[in-house]
Amino acid sequence: METIQVRNPRNGQFDYRFVQPEPDALRRRAGELRAAQRDWATRPVESRVAVLQRWKDQLLVHRGAIVEALAIDTGRHLLAQAEFGGTLAAIDRWCAQAPQLVREEEGRSQAQPSITFRSQLVPYPLVGVISPWNFPLTLSLIDAIPALLAGCAVLVKPSEVAPRFVEPLRASIEALPELAAVFDVVVGDGRTGSALVGLVDLVCFTGSVRTGRAVGRAAAEHFIPAFLELGGKDPVIVTETADLELATDVVLRASVLASGQACQSLERVYVQDSLYDRFVARLVEKANAVPINFPDIHAGVVGPLIFDRQADIIAGQIDDALRHGAKVLCGGRVEIHGGGGRWIRPTVVVDVNHSMQLMTDETFGPVMPVMKFRTIDEAVELANFGTYGLSAAVIAGTLEEAEAIARRIDAGAVSLNDGSLTGVMHEAEKNSFKCSGLGGSRMGAAGLMRFFRRKALIRQTGRPATIGMFDE
Ligand code: NAD
């Protein structure tokens, strides 16, 4: 059995380890979950709601351990608490909605009114969830909660980069045998993720485009649906009518929160020429005032980069931009603290263009490259550049002006006069555009209904047709 060492993002020490599951053990566990799902699916949805509510109580019992483990996994404390609170809210939100959503429809054939139908909702037996390291708890449970309420069994594989929270999370699940029978979380690396795709009936994957492509290919091979939520390179357009204080506040927060390690972080900033100089000066002033959360995890805003290799990617993109004529106005350097933890302060880069990696590739760091535009048509063209289409933002003098621009942007969600609002908007359905994802919306009603196959029970209430009726 292979032991995998895990790095602590605040000091670079490998101070945690886990054992990679054996393929046979994983297959056995998948079989157990699948077998228990039959009973789980036949319960009324209200009964599953009641179990998830009891799980919420257990999560609260284990709250301290989960939040502390998550804080070590991510090197940040407030957002670990926010992830925990968001998970409880997600359970409540889905528990409130599920009884209304999980309804069998009935209807009648227009062509032959004696034929009626009832559509049976048949959950996929076993759902696999594969999640990334940036919001380890949230993204491990975001699909698992609605899938469980739909009546599926769920097997989650979080990222091997941030797995400490799994032990206390599993303790909360194991406290409820009826939940543990259909729900498990297994720690492993990409090999376990790859094996998981072959063991489940539907896969929800959140992660990079590169791995998403591999998961999509494997899912096609196994003939199962894949819901792929992938990377982004979100643009923000700031028009000359925008309020300067609001615009700089939004860009700073939505680029720098979670050290930029969020799929919906703003990573390309396009500002209209007449506002550009004042915007850049104010953004740099504000960026310089944002402290890192070192040495005290409870003080400061910017946490360490969770994944060592991501720090190299960010540094590489900044170097590439500098080589091609860009200027770094603040931040821009990976700093080592705590022995081997890696931080980067809010970074503003100007004189950038679309030939630079910083404007084409996902950065996943607190970096704000700012580019000037003249007309709105030009801004829309710049925003629509590239292979990503996750989300975007527009900041203008009025919401109407912002919306007119937003309607022309190729992205699954656009925040108007704010940024990264997808993080708090769970009700609006959205699809990822271009390479940012594939499959139905994880938000809104579709987020739960995608876990069902609809079976049509078609009833003849009159006399069936006879073969004689088809005599030419
Ligand atoms: P990643 O693609 O490297 O890994 C994601 C998960 O896939 C991990 O659990 C990993 O172990 C697993 N994995 C690796 N190889 C696999 C394989 N061949 N088959 C199956 N699973 C495999 O991504 P990451 O670096 O952990 O996360 C960062 C990425 O996630 C960024 O691109 C970010 O934009 C994206 N992300 C997207 C969203 C969204 O909702 N669209 C949200 C958060 C993060």
Image (cartoon, grey):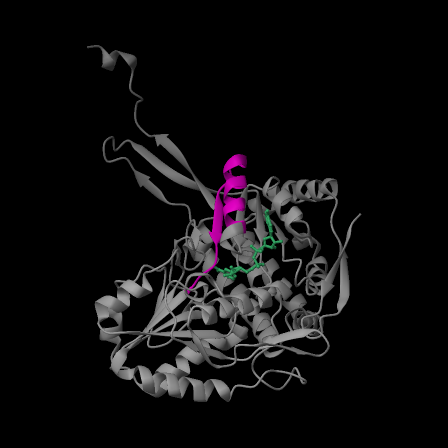
364 and 20: which is toward the camera: 364
Whether residue 404 is visible, yes or no, is: no
Q: Which stretch is magenta?
A: 211-233
Image location of residue 354, percent across then percent down: 37, 64
Task: Specify the quadrant that holds the C terminus.
Answer: top left
Q: Residue at x 65, y 83 (%)?
A: 294
- Residue 197 appears left or right of 407: right
- Quarter of the image for residue 428 reads bottom left
Residue 425 lies in the magenta stretch: no
215 and 462: which is toward the camera: 215
Q: Residue at x 28, y 82 (%)?
A: 242
Above or below 218: residue 164:
below
- Residue 16 appears left or right of 256: right
How many tags in the picture? Answer: 0
33 and 227: which is toward the camera: 227
Ligand number 1: quarter of image: bottom right
Image location of residue 401, percent across then percent down: 22, 74
Q: Residue at x 27, y 63 (%)?
A: 381
Image location of residue 48, percent across then percent down: 57, 55
Whether residue 448 is visible, yes or no, is: yes
